[in-house]
Image (cartoon, rainbow, N blue to C red):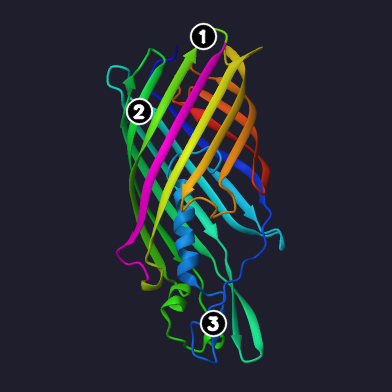
């Protein structure tokens, strides 16, 4: 049985996930009669970014690194990377702490028209967010624990587009002002409830986690007037891992093979915002044990995963470490 404290860090590298979608264009006249921006319902798009931000609210192996490609253009319209982990301090003082730091990029395209001429206006919205969680382990058995968690999140969405004067001709509109270096600040408050099973034996180890999360996000402070809003992140996830020796050794410890599966279902505003309501992951990898040596990292895992869902399929390669 390993000695606590224990920590997991999720960081997937080189992800390739494909979502087959077609561009959805919302027609809205937001300028003067002779200056129209097609597809410029900025509040709708930006609130969608707020809903997308909810995917980074908790450590999740399937959304820790995600790239969504447009099925028509083949170019990434959304990309997300998340680093996070959690650990329990000790069995005698079972305070649980977790945290994530995430970055995402969303690239909607608007169409500006002036008379008979139209031109695409690409926009890049960059999102940074961080979430912390504080919980407490209530033992049910020696191997099973119930863990309520209080979560808090803060994030920011910023537009880095400098709209050309010749495109909008100084149109004074709150939607367009957000496109020109606008920002949305958001915070989230909520909680999670987790069942954590650690079944460790000499020849194999089994980890299972069942988690339900509900976090409410809302804009605040200096958010641009056009994009103030809110979103609800509701997620149910199941994660499991099997580890066993391969018969090989390295660093004076057995080399283990790792089998992993995960399932996440998204509710609330998170549901369908990227074209799917759930994701399933199947993974396989190898693990090195460095616990014999005086280093902070006790285990290092290299993983390959296949992820699939409605209109979603892809593979990712990466690594994770335990402390």
Residue 106 pos. (x, y %): 54, 60
Position of residue 237 relative to residue 20, above or below, is above
Distance between mark 1 and mark 3 Cα atoms: 64 Å
Residue marked by disc 3: 164
Residue extending furthest toward the top: 202
Q: Which mark is residue 201?
A: 1
Q: 115 and 288: which one is in front?
A: 115
Residue 203 pos. (x, y %): 57, 8
Give the secondary structure at mark 1: loop
Position of residue 195 relative to residue 292, above or below, is below
Distance between mark 1 and mark 2 Cα atoms: 23 Å
Q: What residue span does the magenta drawing correspond to?
A: 204-224
Q: Which mark is residue 314?
A: none
Dot placed on the residue nearer the N-terminal end, 1 or 2: 2
> Which of the two marks, 1 or 3, is nearer to us in this view?
1
Distance between mark 2 and mark 3 Cα atoms: 52 Å
Q: Along the horizontal axis of the image, is 17 left or right of 202?
A: right
Main SS, magenta region, reads strand
């Amino acid at each position: 049985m390993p000695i606590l404290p224990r920590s997991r860090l999720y960081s997937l590298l080189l992800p390739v996930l494909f979502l087959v979608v077609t561009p959805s264009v919302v027609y809205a006249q937001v300028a003067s009669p002779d200056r129209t921006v097609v597809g410029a319902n900025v509040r709708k798009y930006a609130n969608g970014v707020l809903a997308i931000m909810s995917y980074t609210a908790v450590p999740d192996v399937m959304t820790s690194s995600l790239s969504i490609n447009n099925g028509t253009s083949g170019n990434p319209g959304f990309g997300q990377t998340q680093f996070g982990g959690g650990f329990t301090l000790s069995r005698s003082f079972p305070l649980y702490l977790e945290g994530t730091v995430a970055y995402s990029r969303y690239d909607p395209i608007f169409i500006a028209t002036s008379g008979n001429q139209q031109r695409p206006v690409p926009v890049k919205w960059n999102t940074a967010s961080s979430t912390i969680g504080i919980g407490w382990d209530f033992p049910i058995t020696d191997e099973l624990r119930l863990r309520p968690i209080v979560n808090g999140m803060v994030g920011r969405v910023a537009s880095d587009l400098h709209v050309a004067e010749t495109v909008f001709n100084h149109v004074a509109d709150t939607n367009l002002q957000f496109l020109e270096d606008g920002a949305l600040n958001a915070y989230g408050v909520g909680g999670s409830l987790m069942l954590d099973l650690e079944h460790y034996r000499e020849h194999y180890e089994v980890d299972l986690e069942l988690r339900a999360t509900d976090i409410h996000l809302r804009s605040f402070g200096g958010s641009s007037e056009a994009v103030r809003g809110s979103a609800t992140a509701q997620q149910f996830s199941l994660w499991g891992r099997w580890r066993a020796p391969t018969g090989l050794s390295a660093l004076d410890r057995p080399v283990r093979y790792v089998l992993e599966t995960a399932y996440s279902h998204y509710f609330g505003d998170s549901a369908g915002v990227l074209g799917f309501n759930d994701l399933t992951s199947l993974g396989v990898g190898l693990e090195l044990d460095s616990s014999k040596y005086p280093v902070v990292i006790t285990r290092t895992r290299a993983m390959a995963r296949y992820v699939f869902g409605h209109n979603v399929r892809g593979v990712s390669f990466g690594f994770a470490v335990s402390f």
